[in-house]
């Protein structure tokens, strides 16, 4: 059967901003009231507040009955294209895989949701055990010696890496001298931005003609000022850097530490590990590789692991087991302190734990093998499209994703990556360009993961093919897209103009409805 | 895979052997192994990951995980008076319904077209928070209060071009550890004392320490001890006289009854939204907000995503997009402001649902109920022999310190005795604030009943006397 593109149209409710739905006197919920006896004993409660601290006017929140609130948000949800609804291979680097529903049941169980983090340890042995076992699993997967789940996302995990690197040099009395972090342009923007928060000067390595970080440039960059390296592998291009162990060796010889950004490790589970490549620290995004859902952009977890030598610098507390019970260990001699409150996004840990338990060792490898199979199949098909290319590593295979280029198509038709993105929406697909800066011209980054069937991948390709045909035959329809999404071409000019931008409804009313 | 040959895993459709073969043929290789050609042999992992035998059947997995979780004892099963950074409030059913919707739960970073709903929901969250806070700019939420406070402080340093921050010494020690790690390399952090009797900021100490190098003063209202600070206006004035900013950490659920910090001069307001419709989740439900006035010098310093409302090609249609994207690290890597990445968007949407459900009267009434119930609990506890409410001269919201020094028992002993009676006593702060001796921080919200509070008072009397 020939793969068809869908005659798709997204839900379009023309839903007003919630303030426009407000109707005086309505309310959405009644909260627990105070008992008469309490009121009789303490009075109205408010008069105890110092006069100058009593709010005189109730906040201007909208007033809606319960079903209206529900309906409004259900409509907004329908105007959002979640991974559960589309062939979500267009948000490359993000690892949009299936998040199993059974794991949601675990994470929304009152046995997790109704736990307070300061409860006595004897009452939280179940969740502590899950966290401890997940730590053990990740040690097996990475070769590291201890994990924390405290970082609330990949970028916060990168900050943690930079913090540990700094604490290490501090401990050795070298932090004054070592003020540079080296990263690469195809590593995540936060690999450059988060260490800068810690005061580091950032040196960025660009790719050589093979698309790999330039080893010669690295050699030139290292010095006695080098604190460490923060790098992904494969990078956003999906090309595995075969010289990675040489990179870590060079950094170590210069006295630095090596941090491995494994936010996305979806192509290499059980295939290659942080330890063998010589890294001192690594992290995995549980909301990417380990299936916890992305939640419109969190809650999330960057599970961070270190070698034995660096455990003493980790954030407090660590989850430990003494042979009888699980406990929180605050006795970390050179700890950086804390990165996030309490112990991290526990729901993501429970989901990731359950996901690993459902797959086992061979299953995890199968995840990676099939993710790589899917990616190389997709690569083959995309390269058959007119105007598409995959810069670097010509004729070679890729790991879990590919950064493509529409440069030729743009030259021939004037249709850009942004136009294609907007037109793909009309067929029910996401398509993502790339992180800035666009080193690859007119970029597109695709990552099919293990979750989508061949038929679904074929459907995505059929969508791209259709848009490419249009670009050559009827470019206007692409350039004016989307046509069948929630809204039409957005006027972004006001978003950089201080006199017009409006981040809240009240700002909008002041500026634009005058 | 695994021991069962040719088993096709339900999460991996293309593990079907025939499909695999077809795809390999299309690629032009014989084996998936060939696709890993770039990974050198010495980097290939040759061992076996020592993981438990997988539980392939969903039922087996369910039994396993539920059995683990069943070992937990929850705040639904016990009466809990724990707070101190994570709070038990009622979570309306609609909040859970919305954040469990597949569309929101599994969306990520689509464009403002096909993800229009995500943008609108977060814009509305910011809009409602803006009303609660009386501020015009609110960010897409960050990780938690600790991060929000850290970034607020760094924003103040960039705005003023100064390098010192003054922090009230009544602050959650955990939160301080976050701030300290985030700021210590570029800022000097100094503490301002609080009056021992009232728990209010010591203005003399502030006057003595503030200088022309001070970027800002950060204090919380209500404080970690639940004390309502009523000198906000004077504190802000002192800050402004010295060219520094006033930064206030606030509990948004208090703002139905308390004056929003912007009204007493705060330039940057931050805090946590966990109380607004998000379950505690053993500390997993946090999300931080940052709010300012709509001035370019403030907006330009946010590292966060800021979603703005605009128009489209079609008359009357709203569109949304990123305001000043280039200021973020997504736009400009290390040249951007701090960094941005996946944080807690779903909790932002949830808090928006919560505020829409409560409305102006609901949030006000809720604040009042919390005031009344916590005052009742303070009264009942203070009637117990040997037990004191050390800062009783000041007004409190939701939380208050309880002093057990005269009872001859440690907080640890008290809490152990309470635990046996099915009660989680207040958070032990005797190691966090050793100068206070044996003190605990109690938290009372709308979910507590008169019976529950009386049960606590009774249990305390029994275990102390």
Image (tube, coloured by chain):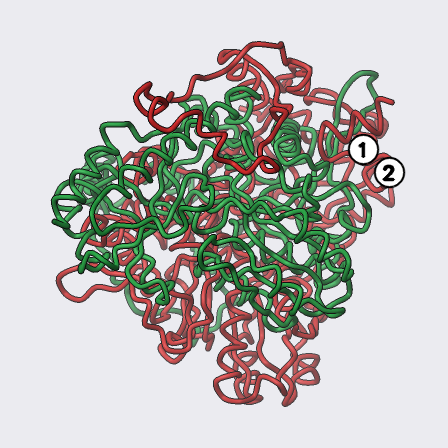
Q: Is residue A419 left or right of residue A273?
A: right
Q: Would you say B172 lies left or right of A210 here?
A: left
The tint of chain B in the picture is green
Q: From the image, tell me which residue sits under label 1.
A: A471
Question: SS of the residue at dot 2?
Answer: helix
Q: Say which of A36 and A81 sits in front.
A: A36
In the rendering, at what x and y percent does residue B45 appear?
A: 37, 69
User: Do we see residue A393 in this rendering?
Assistant: no
As displayed, is residue B317 above or below residue B146?
above
Q: Are marks 1 and 2 in contact (CB under 8 Å)?
A: yes
Rendered residue at 64%/28% (across/down): B124
Q: In this figure, which residue is indicated by the disc labeled 2?
A: A413
Q: Position of residue B364 (x, y in %)?
A: 52, 25
Q: Which chain is red?
A: A
In the rendered image, residue B78, in percent from the top left (x then y), is placed at 21, 37
Q: Quadrant of residue A62?
A: top right
Query: Where A497 sits versus A158, above or below?
Result: above
Tell me which chain the residue with mark 2 is part of: A
Using the rendered view, name the quadrant where residue B14 is placed. Answer: top left
Q: Residue at x 73, y 22 (%)?
A: A487
């Amino acid at each position: 059967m020939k793969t068809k593109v869908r005659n798709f149209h997204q839900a379009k409710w023309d839903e007003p901003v919630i303030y426009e739905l407000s109707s005086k006197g309505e309310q959405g919920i009644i909260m627990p009231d105070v008992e008469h006896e309490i009121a009789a004993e303490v009075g109205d409660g408010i008069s105890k507040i110092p006069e100058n601290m009593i709010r005189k006017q109730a906040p201007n929140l909208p007033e809606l009955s319960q079903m209206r609130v529900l309906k409004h948000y259900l409509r907004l949800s329908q105007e959002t294209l979640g991974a559960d609804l589309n062939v979500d291979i267009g948000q490359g680097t993000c690892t949009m895989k299936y998040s199993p529903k059974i794991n949601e049941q675990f994470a929304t169980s009152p046995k997790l949701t109704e736990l307070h983090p300061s409860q006595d340890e004897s009452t939280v042995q179940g969740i502590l055990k899950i966290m401890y076992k997940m730590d053990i699993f990740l040690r097996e997967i990475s070769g590291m010696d201890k994990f924390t789940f405290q970082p609330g996302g990949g970028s916060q995990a990168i900050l943690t890496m930079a913090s540990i690197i700094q604490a290490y040099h501090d401990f050795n009395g070298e932090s004054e001298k070592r003020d540079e972090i080296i990263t690469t342009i195809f590593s995540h923007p936060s690999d450059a931005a988060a260490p800068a928060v810690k005061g580091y000067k950032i040196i960025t390595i660009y790719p050589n003609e093979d698309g790999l970080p330039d080893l010669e440039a690295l050699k030139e960059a290292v010095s006695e000022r080098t604190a460490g390296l923060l790098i992904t592998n494969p990078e956003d291009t999906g090309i595995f850097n075969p010289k990675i162990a040489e990179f870590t060796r060079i950094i170590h010889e210069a006295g630095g530490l090596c941090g491995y950004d494994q936010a996305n490790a979806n192509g290499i589970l059980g295939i290659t590990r942080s330890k063998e490549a010589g890294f001192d620290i690594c992290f995995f995004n549980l909301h990417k590789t380990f299936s916890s859902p992305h939640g419109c952009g969190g809650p999330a977890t960057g599970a961070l692991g270190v070698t034995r030598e660096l455990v003493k610098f980790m954030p407090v507390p660590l989850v430990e087991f003494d042979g009888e019970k699980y406990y929180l260990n605050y006795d970390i001699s050179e700890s950086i302190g804390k990165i996030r409150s309490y112990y991290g996004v526990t729901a993501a840990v429970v989901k990731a734990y359950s996901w690993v338990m459902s797959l086992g060792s061979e299953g995890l490898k199968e995840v990676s093998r099939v993710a790589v199979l899917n990616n190389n199949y997709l690569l083959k098909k995309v390269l058959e499209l007119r105007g598409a290319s995959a810069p670097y590593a010509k004729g070679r295979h890729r790991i879990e994703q590919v950064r493509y280029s529409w440069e030729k198509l743009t030259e021939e038709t004037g249709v850009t990556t942004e136009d294609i993105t907007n037109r793909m929406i009309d067929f029910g697909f996401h398509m993502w360009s790339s992180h800035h800066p666009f080193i690859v011209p007119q970029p597109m980054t695709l990552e099919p993961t293990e979750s989508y069937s061949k038929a679904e991948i074929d459907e995505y390709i059929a969508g791209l093919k259709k848009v490419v045909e249009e670009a050559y035959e009827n470019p206007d329809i692409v350039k004016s897209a989307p046509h069948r999404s929630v809204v039409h071409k957005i006027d972004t000019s006001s978003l950089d103009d201080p006199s017009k931008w409006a981040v809240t409804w009240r700002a909008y009313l002041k500026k634009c409805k005058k | 895979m695994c021991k069962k040959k040719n088993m096709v895993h339900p999460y991996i459709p293309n593990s079907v052997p025939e499909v695999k073969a077809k795809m390999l043929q299309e690629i032009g290789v014989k084996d998936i192994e060939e696709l890993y050609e770039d990974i050198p042999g010495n980097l290939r992992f040759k061992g076996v990951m020592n993981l438990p035998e997988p539980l392939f059947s969903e039922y087996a997995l369910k039994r396993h995980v539920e059995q683990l979780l069943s070992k937990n004892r929850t705040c639904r099963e016990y009466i809990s008076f724990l707070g101190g950074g994570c709070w038990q409030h009622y979570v309306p059913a609609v909040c859970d319904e919305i954040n469990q919707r597949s569309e929101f739960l599994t969306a990520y970073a689509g464009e403002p077209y096909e993800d229009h709903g995500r943008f609108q929901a977060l814009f509305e969250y910011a809009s409602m928070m803006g009303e609660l806070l009386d501020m015009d700019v609110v960010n897409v939420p960050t990780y938690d209060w600790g991060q929000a406070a850290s970034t607020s402080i760094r924003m103040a340093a960039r705005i003023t071009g100064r390098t010192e921050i003054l922090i009230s010494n009544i602050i959650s020690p955990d939160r301080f550890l976050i701030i300290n790690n985030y700021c210590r390399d570029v800022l000097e952090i100094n503490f301002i004392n609080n009056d021992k009797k009232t728990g209010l900021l010591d203005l003399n100490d502030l006057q003595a320490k503030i200088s022309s190098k001070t970027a800002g003063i950060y204090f919380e209202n209500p404080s970690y001890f639940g004390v309502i600070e009523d000198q906000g206006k004077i504190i802000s004035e002192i800050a402004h006289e010295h060219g520094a900013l006033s930064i206030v950490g606030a509990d948004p659920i208090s703002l139905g009854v308390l004056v929003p910090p912007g009204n007493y001069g705060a330039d940057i307001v931050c805090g946590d939204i966990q109380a607004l419709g998000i379950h505690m989740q053993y500390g997993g439900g946090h999300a931080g907000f940052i709010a300012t006035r709509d001035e370019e010098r403030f907006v330009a310093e946010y590292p966060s995503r800021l979603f703005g409302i605009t128009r489209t090609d079609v008359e009357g249609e709203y569109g949304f997009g990123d305001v000043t994207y280039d200021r973020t690290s997504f736009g400009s890597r290390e040249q951007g402001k701090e960094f941005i990445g996946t944080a807690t968007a779903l909790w932002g949407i949830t808090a928006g649902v919560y505020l829409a459900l409560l409305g102006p009267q609901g949030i006000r009434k809720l604040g009042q109920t919390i005031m009344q119930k916590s005052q009742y609990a303070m009264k009942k506890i203070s009637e117990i022999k040997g037990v004191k409410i050390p800062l009783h001269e000041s007004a409190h919201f939701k939380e208050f310190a309880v002093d057990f020094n005269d009872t001859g028992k440690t907080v640890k002993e008290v809490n152990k005795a309470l635990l046996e009676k099915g009660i989680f006593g207040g958070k032990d702060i005797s190691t966090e604030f050793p100068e206070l001796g044996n003190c605990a921080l109690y938290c009372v919200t709308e979910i507590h009943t008169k019976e529950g509070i009386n049960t606590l008072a009774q249990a305390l009397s029994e275990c102390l006397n």
